[in-house]
Amino acid sequence: MLEKESLKLLAQALEKLGAGFASLPPNAAQAPEIGRVAEVLDLAAARLQDNFPYFHPMYAGQMLKPPHPVARLAYALAQWINPNNHALDGGRASSAMEKEAVAEIAAMFGWTEHLGHLTSGGTMANLEALWVAGQLELGKTIVASEQAHYTHSRISAVLQLKFEAVACDGHARMDVEALKKRLAAGDVGTVVVTMGTTATGSVDPLAEILELREKYGFRVHCDAAYGGYFVLAGNLGAEARRAFDAIGQVDSTVIDPHKHGLQPYGCGCVLFRDPAVGRFYKHDSPYTYFSSKELHLGEISLECSRPGAAAVALWATQKLLPLVRDGEFAKGLGHCREAALELHRRVAGDSRFIVAFAPELDIVVFAPRAESVSRASEVSRKIFEAAARHGLHLAVAELPVEFFEAGLGEMKRDRPRMTCLRSVLMKPEHKEWMDRIWQVLSETTDEVV
């Protein structure tokens, strides 16, 4: 099941890399004890078997997508150098590759000018964006939807910024009317717009929120950590398409290449539309920024040491799979969405289940039909556990009952939130495996119910 053929390419690439340092004097460094290394690797492989099969299409639970083989190989190749993309002294080539890769991501959103860099993940990327927002909108409140990632409230607390949650509509998107009321009360400096919520993949109405910016004068930060790459997808619904087409107008955005960007963990990215915000990062480091007058990535980042290997992997992946509409990478995203639409169609057409709403990206949320919300919650967990025993790995989520209102019928609303089943269909292969996924889900549901 684990792809191994590409390892031959790594050996060839290492020969090429080594040739670039052939002029160095022989290194008398002690070679590793191969026998002992093999023993420890064998132990590590055994330990790693205690995992869900995240790489396989029958894993359709959390947001876990295997890195592309070229990303794995490029990351490993860079480890023989182990560059540090803080200062050019520690990662000259990989820093240049990071700048190129980040510029390609910015271009995906229509930005030719920007300030940005890679981070360890979406949390750190969002922290930097909210930190800059707090500097520009001193003392003002940051707002995000109730379904925005919890990291925004936590980050705001860390930064000692005021934070408030805005209500969602029945599709788990920020309620524009609720936002209007909060804006009218004043003191809002930044609105966080989520392009693909973690729970349901819902897309906030960015275009409508940008219209409000003209009247109320707030910053717009786009949390596209999960959904950002869907700007390239050709099969979005009309509302989601309108929202994604407006990303180029926001003040800052984040995206996680270690999600849909086919990268190893951790690889996030933060982007600012106005390069002038770099003034907030300005600092002095007399022992790192001395080798070049060119911009060091550490001069525009809150993080210091960062893995240059992450930049090498991303650069290589984007060279193989360019970030363009109708390209191979974009078509893969389209397949993910098709898989989600197909699973939703099957679940919605089956009387044993109730669904929340049609997926905007590639996440499907549903629950077993029962006499009450509490009973449906119990059965959801039983199906989750039974499906795993049969090789199908889903996830569970706690969501407001209102998201399921259209399908509840006479079910007793004895809980405000329902434990439901959640499937993230973020592998293009999920489309081809839908018959098998549905077979196991259906048989497991019969077994439990």
Image (cartoon, rainbow, N blue to C red):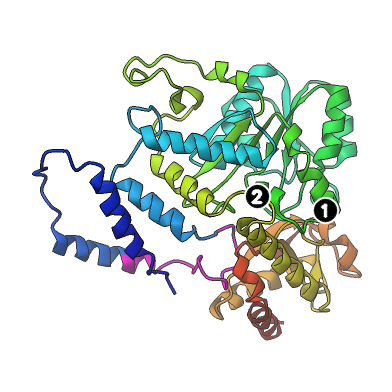
Q: Which residue is painted at 35% across and 52% down in the image?
A: 76
Q: Which mark is residue 80?
A: none
Q: At which x and y percent is residue 10? A: 33, 58
Q: Nearer the viewer, residue 427 or 25?
A: 25
Q: Tell whether 350 sits left or right of 136.
A: right
Q: At which x and y percent is residue 312? A: 43, 44
Q: Nearer the viewer, residue 308 or 99?
A: 99
Residue 405, visible in the rendered structure: yes
Q: On screen, 179 above or below 389?
A: above
Q: What is the quadrant of residue 220 in the picture?
A: top right
Q: At which x and y percent is residue 368? A: 76, 73
Residues drawn in magenta: 45-64
Q: Which residue is painted at 52% across and 19% down in the image?
A: 281
Decide which of tag 2 and tag 1 comes sooner along the chain.
1
Q: Amino acid at mark 2?
A: Val
Q: At which x and y percent is residue 7? A: 34, 64
Q: What is the quadrant of residue 3 in the picture?
A: bottom left
Identify the residue position indicated by label 1 in the image: 171
Name the image quarter holding the C terminus. Answer: bottom right
Give yes or no for residue 312 being in the magenta stretch: no
Give yes or no for residue 52 being in the magenta stretch: yes
Identify the residue position indicated by label 2 in the image: 324
Q: Which residue is painted at 45% across and 54% down in the image?
A: 71
Most common secondary structure along the magenta stretch: loop
Q: On screen, 38 above or below 181?
A: below
Q: Nearer the viewer, residue 425 or 74?
A: 74
